[in-house]
Amino acid sequence: MIGDAAPARRLPPGLTAPWLMLLLPALYSLVDAALVARGAPLWQSLLSVVAAVALPWRRRFPVTVLLLTMPGSYFDDIWLAPITAVYTVAAEHPRPRVVVPCATLFALVEFFHWPVSEQSFELSRDTALYAIQSVMLAAGPAATGLLSRTRRELASRLDELTRGQERESRLLAERVLSEERGRLAREMHDVVSHQVSLISIQAGALQVSTPDPGAAGVARTIRELSVRTLEELRHMVGVLRAGGPRMDTPLAPQPRLADLPRLVEESGLAADTELVPGDRPWPEAVERAAYRTVQEALTNITKYAPEAAVHVRIRARGRRLRVEVRNDAPPVRPAQTLPGGGHGLVGLRERAQLLGGSLTAGPTPDGGFEVRADLPAPSS
């Protein structure tokens, strides 16, 4: 059955090398000239050798090489060199007005080959058969060359159509992604922005109405965090709706290592910090990853161990920046924790891996929890 047929075997790459394809016709044309020229004068043999030696240049000068093979075909009756030249003319020239005269010339030379006899002009059965043979001898390689050129053009057209389909598929995927980004932006704006705005309003009202200075400070911090969250959310929604960051729209300032003290202070946790990033400048992506790692770790501690002591360490270790956030065992487990999706540490691990680093997170022997990230700087 056709479906069960074995796939066609391809020739080894060495047998289809371009230099071999150029030299092989010249070699078998020399063999043809040697077989035909037995007992012939030297000048006839030289014409056949010239026809064979000219074949390696047939792709660059197809018509010229064909003309060089005609004397050998006329005087010495060789076939392989002119057949190869006719094929090359048909394969390389897209115009029939060049192919037809060249094939006709070879047919005439083959029919009226030297020495010309009177039988060539007789209207006989043998003459008609020989004329048909001469025409077929020229038309065969010409038709094969035209077929080869048509096949190359079809393959090029098919490749162009394939690239066009891939481009259309990519544009369709980008449009679907843009629509999904727009839907996600609307959902984020409708849900998160509304809730954070209410938190900010309530915190502002509490800050104004409470007589307790401590509660007023906490309310002020909550309000500032809410406003900052709204600004970041507004920027993210704009990026999602635009399908990506635009070059003419400046991005909001991204957090750096210098912002970590304020982050730890605003967390409200009993944290001691040791920030020794070294004297070398770290890439922006490394500093941002370090900031997000500390931010996510402090958020988790606020959820699950708000009363525990926290230790934040950032040190330079050669070309790597070591980030460690660890909390001791909490004295009292919170009765109710804030909901979490469990994707924060996964995202941090992926961010570290994209930079060529690593992130580990897990409980400590004393009942606490530790997050450790190694973020390398790229080689300059």
Image: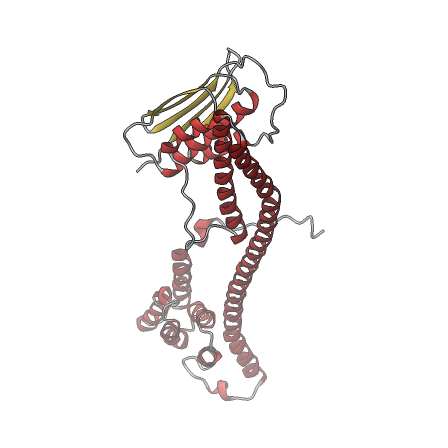
Total marks in image: 0
Measured as percent of width and height from the top left, residue 111 is found at 48, 80
Residue at x-position 43% and y-position 73%: 77
Q: Quadrant of residue 21?
A: bottom left
Residue 148 horizontal side relative to residue 66, left or right: right
The answer to whether residue 8 of the structure is visible from this angle is no
**As drawn, 207 above or below 24:** above
**As drawn, 133 above or below 322:** below
Q: Which quadrant holds the C terminus?
A: top left
Judging from the image, the colouring scheme is: secondary structure
Q: Nearer the viewer, residue 187 or 104?
A: 187
Measured as percent of width and height from the top left, residue 253 is found at 40, 42
Measured as percent of width and height from the top left, residue 78 is found at 42, 70
Q: Nearer the viewer, residue 348 or 378?
A: 348
**As drawn, 127 above or below 239:** below
Q: Nearer the viewer, residue 305 or 265?
A: 265
